Image (cartoon, rainbow, N blue to C red):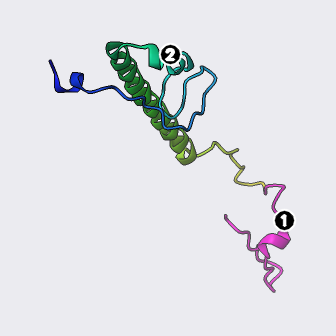
């Protein structure tokens, strides 16, 4: 007999029940039916429920981690931008925003900002 088998198995409930759509508590990861029937379960059934809860918690954390990594990857991935023509000015930019300077000499070209 293992040492853990000699102790009474307490409920993992932390009195903060928040259920998701599948009716699992987000705090202890027990299904609503498991939570209701906890007092009627044998010790072996309670251990089985606790093992299931542990696996559910690991799966939940793994899914949350993968979702976070995907979100982080999307933030660092550059969004494709429309390539601008080298010889045409974008319509959104105006001469006022770039403060184009015209030289005094009429024969020379105006200074056009490159970026």
Q: CA distance from mark 1 to mark 2?
A: 71 Å
In the shown orientation, is residue 88 left or right of residue 28?
right
Q: Could you say which disc has been placed on residue 59 in the image?
A: none
* Residue at 80%, 71% in the rendered image: 97
Per the image, label 1 sits on a secondary structure element best described as: loop
Q: How many marks?
A: 2
Q: Position of residue 47 (x, y in %)?
A: 33, 19
Q: Residues within 10 Å of mark 2 (few under 14, many from 20)?
A: few
Q: Is residue 107 above or below residue 57?
A: below
Which residue is tagged 1?
Answer: 94
105 in the magenta segment: yes
Q: Main secondary structure of the magenta part?
A: loop
Identity of the residue furthest to the left in this view = 1
Q: Quadrant of residue 6?
A: top left
Viewer-nearest of labels 1 and 2? 2
Which residue is tagged 2?
Answer: 37
Q: Which corner quadrant holds the N terminus?
A: top left
Q: Is residue 107 above or below residue 29?
A: below
């Amino acid at each position: 007999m293992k040492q853990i088998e000699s102790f009474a198995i307490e409920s993992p409930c932390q009195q903060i029940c928040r259920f998701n759509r599948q009716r699992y508590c987000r705090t202890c990861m027990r299904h609503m039916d498991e939570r209701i029937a906890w007092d009627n379960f044998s010790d072996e059934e309670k251990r089985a429920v606790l093992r299931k809860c542990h696996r559910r918690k690991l799966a939940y954390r793994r899914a949350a981690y993968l979702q976070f990594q995907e979100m982080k990857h999307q933030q660092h991935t550059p969004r494709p931008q429309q390539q601008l023509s080298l010889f045409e000015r974008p319509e959104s930019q105006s001469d006022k925003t770039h403060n184009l300077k015209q030289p005094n000499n009429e024969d020379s070209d105006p200074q056009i900002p490159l970026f």
